[in-house]
Image (spheres, rainbow, N blue to C red):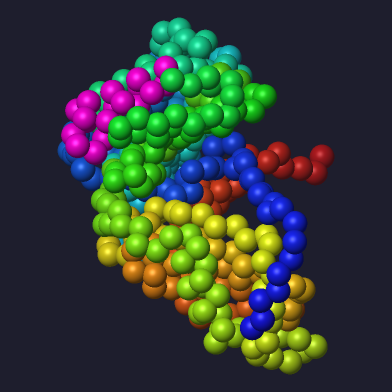
Amino acid sequence: MKLLRRNGAREHLFFTVFLCVLVVTVGVSSVAYPVYSSELTVPEKALAFLEDVAMLDMTKYNATLEIYDERYPDELHGLAQHNVLYILVSDESELEAAFGFKNESFAHCMLGTLDSPLYSEPQPANIVDNAKGFLQRYQTYTGDPDFDGVRDFEGMRSILDMVDVTENVTAMSDHVKLEVISRTDYTALVWEYVLDGVAFPWMTLEFRNGIVCGFDDNWRLYTVGSTDINFSEEEAINVALEYLEDFSWKATQDGELVEVTDFEIIEEPRPVELITTMSREPLTLNPYWRIELYLDKIYPGNVNRILLTIWADTGEVISCTPLGGGGGPPIPEFPSWTPMLLVLTILAVVLAFYKRRLPKTTNQ
């Protein structure tokens, strides 16, 4: 492996996640507060959320449970994940509501409609007031206190007064970090919990044209395993470069399986990000560095860069994966853990629903 230096400014790539598939990303929930009645089923909890938190007037909707399934993804370590899809139909509008529950606790909800929802009472046109009311109702729904040493609902509400939700801005308080992502017709409020200066995923509330379209609660299942950042960004890059000196991958070239051992790494671009969404021990979150090192050309397997993840406290390499496609998939040395399983599950659920709703052609 050779390291090439290239002059020029680092290019920063910013990707916006499509409506209601974000942050999910990360998709974590919790069992910290068993506030639901033991007599309620998961679908009933979903309906309670629509009525008590989203404030839909359920007396005006005919709710049909289209999908209700149970899965056991590896990252939940034996806990169940339930997916729920309700179709709400009224004389004036139709709405789809997709839910995820983990260990029977709320994890996320996506709301899709082409029309204005029918509410049990008028909702504020102002996003800040709307978000404050939503958080207050969700707190009542979960039974959580204002602050328990970790979850700070009062802090989440009050920090909204520090930002302009029409701009892309970030605000910080003692326990809470808020990022606002603003587009022409879309606004996302992303709260993170700050512990020892390290931000961990918390909640995301999304609006489309001023209407709530998505909500994720990312702090109801996992706990913090470590906040130690013993390896800086520069030190983590050095660990990655040293690791790649003996790294290779296999791919198909001209119909034959080859092993790539000689490759060159360029200095720019070099995206590096500190992330806190991975479990080292069951259901704990630990900070790690995500580093992409670009190559000087496209190598067998259509590989043009290598992705490494490194624990920020120990400097241990978690995974090393050549990125590319075609010509035979590259074989990573470590299995790659990914939080995208939740997103793929939801997409599969929604696609299955829409496939069933496609108009059928009949012979006359």
Q: Can you name the residue that lies furthest to the top here?
A: 122
Question: Can you say whether 179 is above or below 15 in the image?
Answer: above
Q: Nearer the viewer, residue 277 or 142?
A: 277
Q: Point out the stretch of residues depicted in magenta.
A: 144-161
Left or right of 364, for residue 334: left
What is the quadrant of residue 218 in the picture? top left
Measured as percent of width and height from the top left, residue 125 is found at 52, 10
**Residue ID at (50%, 17%):** 127
- Image quarter of the N terminus: bottom right
Q: How many marks?
A: 0
Q: From this viewpoint, is residue 329 visible?
A: no
**Residue ID at (56%, 80%):** 244
Measured as percent of width and height from the top left, residue 291 is found at 54, 63
Left or right of 107, for residue 166: right
Measured as percent of width and height from the top left, residue 285 is found at 32, 55
Measured as percent of width and height from the top left, residue 107 is found at 37, 42
Question: Can you say whether 82 is above or below 326 in the image?
Answer: above
**Does the magenta portion include 154?**
yes
Question: Can you say whether 190 is above or below 13 in the image?
Answer: above
Q: Nearer the viewer, residue 155 or 17?
A: 155
**Residue ID at (35%, 30%):** 173
**Does the magenta portion include 86?**
no
**Residue ID at (24%, 38%):** 150
